[in-house]
Amino acid sequence: MMGMLGKLRTGVAVLAIIYILIPLIVVIPASFTSANYPSFPPEGFSFQWYTKLLERPEFIEAMVNSFQFALLAAFFSVLFGTLGALAIAKYEIPGKAYITALLTAPLSVPQLVLGIALLIYFTPMMLAGTPTGFLISHIIICIPYVIRLVLTGLSGFEYNLERAAAILGANPVTVFWRITLPLIRPAIISGGLFAFLTSFDNVTVSLFMVSSDMRTLPIEIFSHMQDAYNPIVASVSSVVIFISVILILIIEKIHGVGKVFGGTQT
């Protein structure tokens, strides 16, 4: 019986993975088509749509904007999220459960509702349609990932190591940099990765925060598809996929994906 349940779980997991990968199986080959319209299987093989992508300054500018905002959102999310998670995990704060629920609420609130709420809130403050408002909105949707992952990393944290370092004369800053930070680094890296990808790929909230002179890559793809859908959209999407894969490979080379997502480090 247990063996059948194990095979069933494995089968469901395989089907789920295949379902997730279907868009990649379609989009990437379609970007190499030699036809003037999207086709799968692709008609012929050509790099023409990647070449034409380099001739479209709006996509290049949008990609640069996406990278800039995603890096800033990831940085501030890691900074504030890590400090928040440490405060929640290490100190007895009144109403800790409510504070944690409030900080992680963007994970459960539909992004359409969140985008409308941010637009209503930012408009009187003159932040709607500005780079500052756009960045703040992305930090809001990214911080919960960092808090969740850092709290998970702190769940098995050995606080006696910090006490031992303090007894031996280390000041609080030294204890943090030499003891706490190395032990929770995998969780921080995971949170930063999720924050970057969440900001880089976000469409729903971004639609309410962007202006005509400030476009990100997902918004540019969305706008282009409304006017005319051609294989250049597939080539742009493939570039985003390649960047994500390269980022994961770099993390694997430096830290190891197993360590990053496992939350342990030796």
Image (cartoon, rainbow, N blue to C red):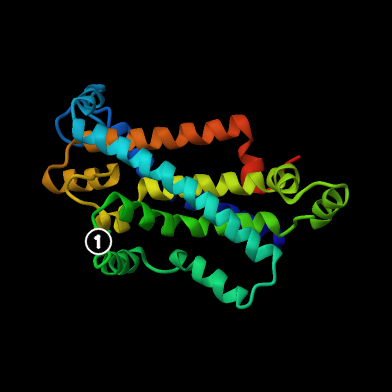
Q: Nearer the viewer, residue 102 or 255?
A: 102
Q: Position of residue 230 (x, y in %)?
A: 17, 37
In the rendered structure, the answer to whether residue 155 lies left or right of residue 217 reads right
Query: How many numbered discs, if any?
Result: 1
Q: What residue is drawn where x is 88% and y is 47%? A: 168
Position of the C terminus by quadrant:
top right
Task: Estimate the x, y position of residue 54 in percent, counting from the top left.
Answer: 23, 25
Task: Farthest residue to the left: give it.
Answer: 227
Left or right of 230: which side holds 67? Answer: right
Which residue position is annotated with label 1? 126
| Above or below, 245 relative to 52 | below
Is residue 77 depicted above or below 111 in this figure?
above
The residue at 31%/56% (across/down) is 133
Position of the N terminus by quadrant: bottom right
Residue situated in front as seen by the camera: 32 or 169? 169
Depicted 238 relative to depicted 22: above or below: above
Question: Label 1: few (<14), some or many (≥20) within 10 Å?
Answer: few
Q: Amino acid at mark 1?
A: Met
Q: Secondary structure at mark 1?
A: loop
- Inspect this view and state whether residue 40 appears: no
Who's the residue at 25% across and 59% down the image? 128
Q: Position of residue 66 (x, y in %)?
A: 33, 41
122 lies left or right of 185: left
On the question of residue 100 being in view, the answer is yes
